[in-house]
Every structure is written in structure tokens, then in C-alpha cells.
Amino acid sequence: MRVVSGIQPTGDLHLGNLLGAILRWVRMQDEAQCLFFLADLHALTVDVDPGQLAKSVREMAAALIASGIDPAKSILFRQSAIPAHAELAWILQGTARMGWLNRMTQWKDKAGKNKEGASVGLFTYPVLQAADILLYQATHVPVGEDQKQHIELTRDIAIKFNTDFDVELFVPPEPFIGGGTAARVMSLRDGGAKMSKTDPSDMSRINLIDDDDMIAQKIRKAKTDPEPLPDDPALLEGRPEAKNLVGIYGAVTGDSVEQVLARFADQGFGSFKPALAEALIALLKPIRSRLDELRSDTAELDRILADGAARASALGAPTLASAYTAVGLGR
């Protein structure tokens, strides 16, 4: 089993990233061979600050390692360090079809009403994403609900390429369900919206770099309702902010929603919020401390990423060579 996943190096990691993906990646390391990459080529599909991009790559690498990604267990690398990603993506653009890409819901969402003004890269980035996966013969890809369509597209591309060129080169990947349950973390200001680094309000999210006082302040000011917590999870329906905070507490402590409610039933948020803040501080304090150490040693971060790139490149080179041969390009 080989797992591949990437994350764009844009902005600071927040609690939603940590509970929704990163800690699941950490657990995956003991279940499969894992390749994790900083998707800096994908970052070019929208306006980018060139001076900030390299810094953001290092920052994201530091955050992943601080959160528990072990470069000795997994392969951690910068996407652009391996030209094979872009080369294979171009070959696969001859296989992918306009109709497939037109149906991608994320393209519709991100381009909005300004499709003519969106970059070509934003339209075709699912093909690069397919190359990211197929280059390494990944058998599984961890995905959330919003990414299942991309795995289906990757499978379609793999199968069509194999059929068109009468080869058995690419492995159609499966969604990876290991690594435990990923929490769906919502905004602290709106229980109906995902926690996001693009939200203009910093109070809507807990950043990994927030200090203890800031974490406590953000939880104290998080939107709630006046009702006490129930003893039945079904009674949280229709109470999105309460449901979100209970879910965060459970994800941080490892308790089920039922266990959280059994502990706090009939109590108000005046009692629950301090307990939640305490649990968050206990989780994030060592991560923040390790992050500070890594940030101060850019040479070590660069070494880790270079080592990961060398290992990933060795894994991907045979696949790229075979793809060139299959389409009739001499190498």
C-alpha cells in the first residue's frame, strides 16, 4: 500500500487543517508507505507572491513536522523539486477530456462567474493532481467529501491511458479510509462554514501559532447559543455552533460525542468553554514549541525537503520513463 497526499503552502496551518487532515496523516505513517508533498505548483493557479512562496513552503514543512509527520517514516518533499510532476501532467493532458474537467465542481466553485478570467491552470489543475498521484503508483489517496470527484477523475485518466496505449502502467487509486476519522472543523464565528485561513476574521479560527492566551480568548468569544448542552447527540442538530465545539473537544481528546455530552450534559458554555480551551492548549503547546525550533533552522528544513525529493524522484522516475515510451516519445 502506497499513499500520496499534498497540501498547498499558503498561509498558516489552523486547527481545521490539523484535526481534519494532518493528524490523520500522522496516524497513516504506521499503516502504509506515505508520500506527503508541499503543492507549490498548484499554488500557481491563482495570484501568488513570488517572494512569499519559498518562505511558505518552509513554514508548511515545519508545521507538518511539528505536528508529527516523521521524515524518517514518510517522504516529505516540495512538489516543484521534481520536474516529473509537470512532465507527466502534460502527457496526461492528452488523455484527459474537456468534458471531464468541465464537470469538476471545484472548478465551478473557484472560478465562479468569472470563468473567462480564471487561469488555465485553475481549470487543468486536476490533471496535475492526477499526475501527482499516478507518478508514484499510489494505491490509495486520503480524501474528504470535496475531493472524491478528483480521485474518480484520476481513475478515469489512468484507465483511459492504459487502454489507449495498451499498457498496464498506471494504478487506478482508491480512496484511503485509514488513519482514523478526520474531524470536520467549522468556523468559530459561523457553525455553518468550514474553518478557513481565507476567512477575513482571525477570530474564526485557531492558528497553530496562537499562544495560550489567544487560544483561550478565541474559545471564550466563539459563537454559541444560550441553551445548555444536551445528553443526546441528536439534540445538537439545529445547533451548529454547539455541535462544532463539542466535535472539536471530542477530536482533541479522542472522546466520542456521546462521551463528551455525558460529561457536560446540562452544563452551559460558561463551564464547557474553559475545558475546551484547556484541552486545545494541551494539544497545541508542544506543536507550537517544536514549530518555533524548526523555524529557526532553515538549513535543516531544506535538508529534509531535499532528502525527501531525492527519495520521491527515485520512486517516480521509472513511471515517467514508461509514460514517455508508451506515447512514443524517445528518452
Image (cartoon, grey):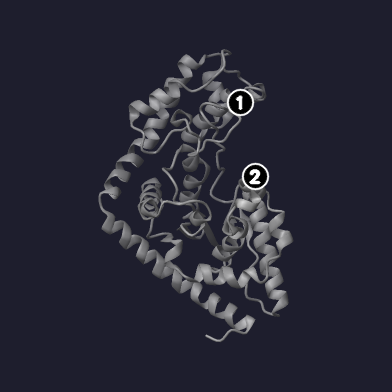
Q: Would you call the spot at circle 1 few (<14 residues within 10 Å), some (14-19), or many (20 or more)?
A: some
User: Percent from the top left, x then y, of residue 183?
Assistant: 55, 39
User: Percent from the top left, x then y, of residue 319?
Assistant: 55, 75
Vertical placement of 328 versus 47: above or below? below
Q: Secondary structure at mark 2?
A: loop
Q: Nearer the viewer, residue 228 or 87?
A: 87
Q: Residue visible at 61% across and 58% down?
A: 126
Asked if residue 301 shows in the view, the reply is yes
Identify residue for label 1: 240
Q: Residue visible at 42% across and 61% down?
A: 77
Mark closer to the observer (1, 2): 2
Q: Amino acid at mark 1?
A: Pro
Q: Amino acid at mark 2?
A: Gly
Identify residue for label 2: 112
Residue found at the far bottom of this picture: 330
Give me the C-alpha separation between circle 1 and circle 2. Answer: 27 Å
Vertical placement of 209 versus 120: above or below? above
Q: Nearer the viewer, residue 173 or 92?
A: 92
User: Percent from the top left, x then y, of residue 292?
Assistant: 29, 44
Q: Secondary structure at mark 1?
A: helix
Asked if residue 31 shows in the view, the reply is no
